[in-house]
């Protein structure tokens, strides 16, 4: 393969690794999505290992997560025992998958800890010196809680609009 093609591909994979890391996803997940996305043919796990340079176990774990988010899909090949994967290319669909994932209990429980931390502060019996630090904590935690609540409302709105759009399309086309 041409060296510029290889360099461009590797640079792209590196870039998506950074983007994944920025969004709190494992770098390997970004690298795997990039490799699958740039593949003109479905990829098997062993090929992904070679292209991305991670273990088969890490590939398998991250591939399951990519599937769960709707970023990749299994593609069966007749007569083959291996699983092959293709990338979802509709980025809005990917965003919806990630936003829907945020509705899972783990995410909600993580956000709930901010409110529970505030409750703990409110119940605390503090000295005069500790009260100042507690007030600082409360201000910071309340700011974060407001932000999380706003994000939660925004995500709910985006998902509701998407659902409304799908219902409208189904009504128009009778499906």
Image (cartoon, rainbow, N blue to C red):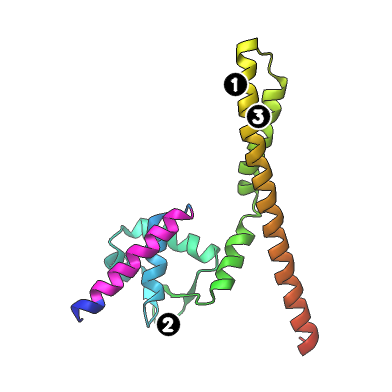
Q: Is residue 142 magenta?
A: no
- Secondary structure beneath label 2: loop
- Secondary structure beneath label 3: helix
Q: Residues within 10 Å of mark 3 (few under 14, many from 20)?
A: some
Residue 81 in view in this figure:
no
Q: Where does the magenta region start and end?
A: 6-23
Residues tagged 3 and 2 counted as in contact (Cβ below 8 A):
no
Residues tagged 3 and 1 counted as in contact (Cβ below 8 A):
no
- Which residue carries the number 3 mark? 138
Q: Quadrant of the N terminus?
A: bottom left
User: Disc 1 or disc 2, which is closer to the eye?
Assistant: 1
Picture coordinates of residue 98, whole percent (x, y): 57, 61
The Cα atoms of the two marked residues, 3 and 2, are separated by: 57 Å
Q: Residues within 10 Å of mark 1 (few under 14, many from 20)?
A: few
Which quadrant of the structure image shows residue 41? bottom left
Q: Up-down: is 25 above or below 96?
A: above
- Give the mark nearest the N terminus, 3 or 2: 2
Residues tagged 1 and 2 counted as in contact (Cβ below 8 A):
no
- Give the mark nearest the N terminus, 3 or 1: 1
Q: Is residue 10 magenta?
A: yes
Residue 78 in view in this figure:
yes
- Which residue carries the number 2 mark? 77
The Cα atoms of the two marked residues, 3 and 1, are separated by: 9 Å
The Cα atoms of the two marked residues, 1 and 2, are separated by: 62 Å
Q: Quadrant of the C terminus?
A: bottom right
- Which residue carries the number 1 mark? 133
Q: Up-down: is 59 above or below 77?
A: above
Picture coordinates of residue 82, whole percent (x, y): 39, 73
On the rendered structure, is 149 left or right of 34? right
Question: Residue at left 45%, top 54%?
Answer: 22
The foreground one among 80 and 17 is: 17
Q: Up-down: is 175 above or below 4?
A: below
């Amino acid at each position: 393969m041409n060296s510029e093609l290889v360099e461009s591909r590797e640079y792209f994979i590196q870039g998506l690794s950074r983007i994944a890391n920025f969004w709190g996803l494992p770098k390997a997940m970004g690298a795997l999505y990039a490799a699958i996305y740039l593949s003109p043919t479905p990829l098997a796990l062993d090929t992904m290992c070679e292209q991305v340079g991670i273990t088969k176990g890490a590939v398998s774990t991250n591939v399951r997560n990519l599937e769960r988010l709707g970023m990749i899909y299994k593609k069966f090949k007749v007569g083959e025992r291996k699983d092959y994967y293709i990338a979802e290319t509709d980025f809005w669909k990917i965003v919806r998958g990630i936003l829907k994932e945020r509705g899972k209990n783990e995410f909600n429980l993580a956000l709930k800890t901010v409110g529970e931390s505030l409750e703990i502060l409110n119940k605390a019996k503090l000295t005069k010196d500790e009260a100042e630090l507690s007030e600082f904590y409360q201000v910071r935690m309340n700011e974060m809680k407001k932000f999380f609540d706003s994000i939660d409302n925004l995500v709910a709105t985006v998902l509701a609009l998407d659902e409304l759009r799908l219902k409208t399309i189904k009504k128009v086309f009778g499906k």
